[in-house]
Image: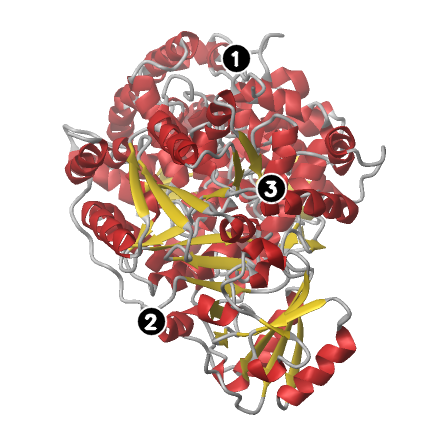
Amino acid sequence: MNTREKILQEVLDSQPDTTPLPDISLFKGGEDDPVQKYMDVFKTIGGEVFLVEDLAAVKTSVHERFDLSKRVVTTVPELSDPFELLSGTVEPRLYDDVELAVIRAHFSVAENGAVWLTDQLMGHRIIPYICQHLAVLVKAESIVPTLHEAYERIGIGDYGFGGFIGGPSKTADIEQALVLGAHGPLSMTVYILKQPFPLSK
Amino acid sequence: MKKEIKKDHADLAEAFIRDEERVDWHDGALWFIREKRDRASKQIPEWEALREAASAVKSNVISNLHAYLLQFEENLIKNGVIVHWADNAEEHNEIVYSILKAKGLNQLVKSKSMLTEECQLNEYLHERGIEVINSDLGEYIQQIDNEPPSHIVLPCIHKRKEEIGELFHTHLGTEKGLSDPTLLTRVARKHLRNVFITRRAALTGVNFAVAETGEYVVCTNEGNADMGAHLSDVQIASMGLEKIVPQKKHLGIFLRLLARSATGQPITIYSSHYRKPRPGQEMHLILVNAGRTNQLKRPDFRDSLKCIKCGACMNTCPVYRKSGGLSYHNTISGPIGAILAPNLDMKKHADLPYASTLCGSCSNVCPVKINIHEQLYKWRQVIVKEGYATQTKALGMKAMAWTFSSPATFTTAGKAGRWFLHNIPFVVNNKFNPWYKQRDMPEGPKESFSEWYEREEKKKEQQHT
Amino acid sequence: MTVGLFIPCYVNQFYPDAAKATLQLLRKLGVNVAYPLKQTCCGQPMANSGFENLTQPCDDLFIENFSSFDYIVAPSASCVLHIKDHLHSPQNAEGANKIRKGIYELVEFLTDVLKIEKLDAVFPHKVGLHHSCHGLRGLHLSQMSELNAPPFSKPQQLLSMVRELEQVSLDRADECCGFGGTFCVAEEAVSVKMGKDRVTDHTKNGAEYITSSDLSCLMHLQGILHRNKSAVKVIHIAEILNAGL
């Protein structure tokens, strides 16, 4: 018997009588306005959030808030001028000098401030983690109240990699002192767009 | 490699407590996290129902683990992940080594994984010429100090910033006396970023593994798991068999509970769902037993496998807060460690179930409702039965049972000069009794309640006749 | 209604006043109380140390002493919890079951069985309430701070009936004091540190007395207070509820 078979046999011999899965369909969000709730929560976790009209407003804000003399990348074609439009084929280590990444998320979650994005929207999986600053665009209408609605929306999904990102990377490992910018971005900005914008690839 | 630990919990705790200022800081820092957990949980009206549901999902997992493991494996393979099975630490370590060797790699960057700590992977690979760097800041600090993590979520919570500054001065060449947490973190960021960029192999732990889709979720706040994994050519994940959840939607429950229980955050900054290797990348997953099936066999203790490693039981445990995680001399410390460890080595860890007052706070904060304090009680019974209690303690207890069960002995002894003063461990009045080191006993009253009661009753009878 | 008074062994020996207060208070409230003289220990110190297998004689004796009563009441949450959770008898399962169901800690007997709404008691002092873990998390005498559930407190409800008593609020409402049975000597350093920190919480918040429904916790805290020559005293809750002018 090989290790796999041995372990599986032991599991089969040791596991107790089966118990049913609970009904979790009752778990859902409350009546709060998801946009307002999202903005309130995201601020408390060290993020910056702006409710804006459209992509033009995003452009303006990015110009005001970030050092654009450094490398800025995006997956949003409408922002590719003047930013560098990402292509997923590049060796990931070459993104080490990215100052700012501007990418879209599929949606975000009001209760915890997290945005959900899959590798289709990242350009490259490493982008939202390796950049010094991260800016994410979400549609106001796409904000869901809790993770239950979030997973309902994701479903089985078709991605190689997907992640919730809820704020700038942080650590409190040294004496519980909160430090933003552990290994990932030092800051995270979310732009909530009131007007629909294309979410196609 | 690591600092040798031979003393038991009480000895190690006593040593930790000698530095009372540190203990007070440690206690306060962890209590603050417990308070943050309380506040976060109280913002969710359905919190207790979520815990109930999480516990029920995990019960279902434990009772159908065989089928879920097969389903998970099948989906992993479909996703292009290479699956390995390891029955013990040695097999796990060999697998990691062989993966690296096949690629000709002699460096590995690792994010937090208690399982690989349990397996002592770093030591194993080090002996074979492979350099491992722990990338979680707290684990990195513990690694350069050659000490195991003292807490599963906050690996160096027992260290003061000045000590960390000293370590950085020695190992990273920072200015002597630098102890500002932000500046120290920046130094580590810069140093470890170079590590991430240059390593070709990365290993992560696994928080949840979804049988339905064959994906696994890794939660961090620092982003170190993602930095390692997405920059690697070879990505390895090690997981205990118990990390399975049946369906994707169950992640909603567990991710709502995990960070709130751990640190009071609404969710960890990063909750990464790994499903397929990216083009050109190799992805391995190692399913590790290392005693899980043995624990699964024990009806009283199998629920310990529900643990999602949030650390809430440690933060709330007053014994943990006063004694420090290293006093548990086990990879997983605190209350949950004390019910997991005896399964792995009962003799070595016989002291741990006794490192508790059985106050029960751990069970109340547990997001998957493990009856931790009841299991501590039950482990004590097992440890005694299996003969691992110390002889003196056993004899003392036998004498006590004999005396207590015989009212004649009890009362005579009591009258003859407070039977207790000779028999109950905490009142034996001599200089060897630890009670008296820092405490007094109340002075014995002139008469016991029973003597008084008997006298009163006689008086009453006499009045009536 | 007949009530068998169960006085834990160490209370009998060291705290007869608490036992007397319990008896007097119950009688004052019109309860028919008797104290079986042959009682000894409930067996908890052994069971909690892992020697549950040695406690059968204690259990048998307990059943013998108390099976004739409608209720059993004790001024000790810890011992009551032990009986409730662990008393068993292979020969007399029904008798054991009756005992486990009929035993009450004093506070819960007053609030849940007698359902008293007022007390003729006065205690003009600042009092800190120490929740014993066995009373709190075992018998559920108060709501536990860890849970997201409506607050309540049976001992506080009773203390609020006592005239001129001022309850002090604590920084950590229901943290363990570190007594823990044999833990108090087996883990002396941790036990004392936990006790010291509980004492500090009470004293810095102005308590003149620390009260509890468990004398084992109080004995431990008293030991620390006394060693450190503190003026703060411990008192069992029965003595406060029974306190007149």
Please name the residue that numbered disc 1 is placed on: B421
Please name the residue that numbered disc 3 is placed on: C211
Say which element carries label 3.
strand
The location of residue B298, given as percent across then percent down, is 25, 33
Which amino acid type is marked by label 2?
A: Gly
Do marks 3 and 1 both belong to one polypeptide chain?
Answer: no
Return the chain for callout 1.
Answer: B
Along the line of sight, the residue nearer the viewer: C38 or B425 = B425
Residue B458 image-quadrant placement? top left
Which amino acid type is marked by label 3?
A: Thr
Answer with left or right where residue A98 lies relative to residue B294: right
Q: CA distance from mark 3 to mark 1?
A: 25 Å
Residue C7 image-quadrant placement? top left
Please name the residue that numbered disc 2 is placed on: A155
Q: Is residue B107 visible?
A: yes
Which amino acid type is marked by label 1?
A: Leu
Along the line of sight, the residue nearer the viewer: B239 or C204 = B239
Location of residue B243 with respect to C60 vertically, above or below: below
Neighbour class for label 2 at 10 Å: few (<14), some, many (≥20)?
Answer: few
